[in-house]
Image (cartoon, coloured by chain):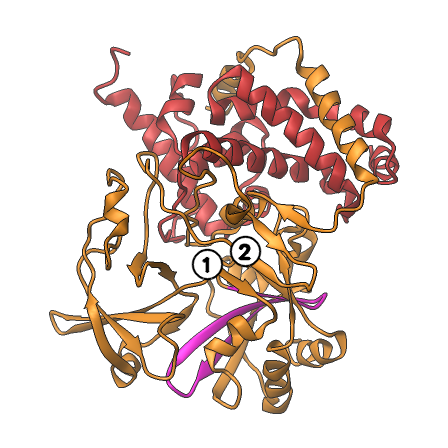
Amino acid sequence: MSNKIKQEMNKIEIPKELSERSKMGVSQAKKEMNKDRKRINVKGIGIAAALLVSVGAFTLFNNDTPDGTTESQEALVVNEDGSVEIPAIQLPEDTSSASMIGLIIYNGKVYTQAATEIDPEDAKAIIGDKLGTTKGTIDEWSKQEAYDEEFASTIGETDVYSVKGYDKDFRIMTYQEQDGKKYAEFYENLNGITINSGEGVFGQLNMVSNVSSAQYRNFSDWDNGIKNYQSVTSMQALNIFLEELNKVKPLPREENSDPIGNSPNRNNEDFRELSINLNDGSLVRLTLLRDGYIYYGFMDVYFEMNEDVFLKMWSQLE
Amino acid sequence: MLDLVKEAQKGNDKAFMALFQKYEQDIYRMAFVYVKNPNDALDVVQETAYRSFKSIKNLKEPKYFKTWLIRISISCSMDLLRKKKKVVYLKPELEGNLSDDINEDIDLEVTVRDLIERLNEDEKSVIILRFYEGLTLKEISKTLNIPLGTAKTILYRALDKLRKNLKGDDFYE
């Protein structure tokens, strides 16, 4: 099989101009390398990076505007003040090649499956107002109109609620009881927003002074799905860390500036998954890298923390 | 090779070209499988050269040059597909509980066209990296930045599709 695929791939003819095109790319880069770019526009790259790092999640982006031009609104933009604009997810006209997972349209915004989990029993206690019922109207063959509808979704029919203690512009919840079993899931709107600091994301998670326990695991356990968690013993260090999270600086993820994508960071020394249980039963999962970087969910940005505070936290994870 | 990477990181374009040209045919063929035509595949090669030279200074470990370059070329292919076709890439939550011994040895009559037409983008990535580039599943999971279990699942699914394709109703094609 291996040889067969290689043989077949090698049958793809190499055009004469191949080397010429490589050179053109390099010389174009060389010309630009001396220029100072005040505004970094990483058109599409963050999106591609998001694809590559999707872990059981997905990206749903469309790089083209209806008139076929590419505008800055689709791009991840770093402003001069350091804030990062994450473009609104644009729904596709043609999804024929797509496989799809959880998203809900609510208030004209796209909420996607969250990286924070909730136990269905605990979910019952924080159910807010019923917002509506999803329609399972989006599938691979949907037309654009399907996405304009409120509560259009890829998750079939289920009831959607606000969540007590959380802003519904940020988080909503599906909840269902079926055959005696309960199902609950958070959905979060992490696109079409500008992130100035960690507060825009971590502040929404209500973690400060709200932690019941926390644990961590190393890279290989995470990678292999092994539930080998160690407890975080110093709540003080954790609380200081969580407060500092509101001040961290956002950085756009692109394939060359995305430390989690660097193989050297994907090892037991440099990588920790930190799971934080909150008093309301929700479980926030963060990824920390030794160099001071923090990731939440499947966002197109990651965060960098002040070294002193970070290292105190990191020492708790070793 | 490591010396060339270091030279390229200092901005030496000739050193970079010497490196890049070792891989440009691989990049072209991989791109072809994603974008399905020579012109777009050439655009991907040019864009990959452009992006990689611009950012090679950020490459921390020169020994990972090849997989780093492959990642960039996959990104470029995906970007081009999105621009042209408005394709979306959604990944279902994948269960990673497969056994380690995925059967890769069945002698399939696979054609380039099967790869192009039958597999979605993430399946193409895994199949190409596994069988064309000869990467291990572990290396694939690192290159694509996905958990090992997910890489296994995608490989299993892709092989399954290619096998079904043989048995299925498309034999007249």
Residue, disc 1: A191
Q: Which chain is red?
A: B
Which chain is mark 2 on? A
In the figure, is residue A313 to the left or right of A74? right
Residue, disc 2: A300
x and y percentages locating residue A28 in the rendered image: 75, 28
Toward the front, the furthest residue is A67
x and y percentages locating residue B92 in the rendered image: 35, 50
Q: Amino acid at mark 1?
A: Asn
Give the structural element (helix, strand or loop) at label 1.
loop
Tint of chain A: orange
**Which residues, given as a range, are shown in magenta?**
A273-296
The foreground one among B111 and A246 is: A246
Does the stretch in magenta take in B139?
Answer: no
Q: Quadrant of the C terminus of chain A?
A: bottom right
Please determine whether, in this image, residue A52 is positioned above or below residue A188: above
Does the stretch in magenta take in A284?
Answer: yes
Q: Quadrant of residue A266?
A: bottom right
x and y percentages locating residue A315 in the rendered image: 70, 79
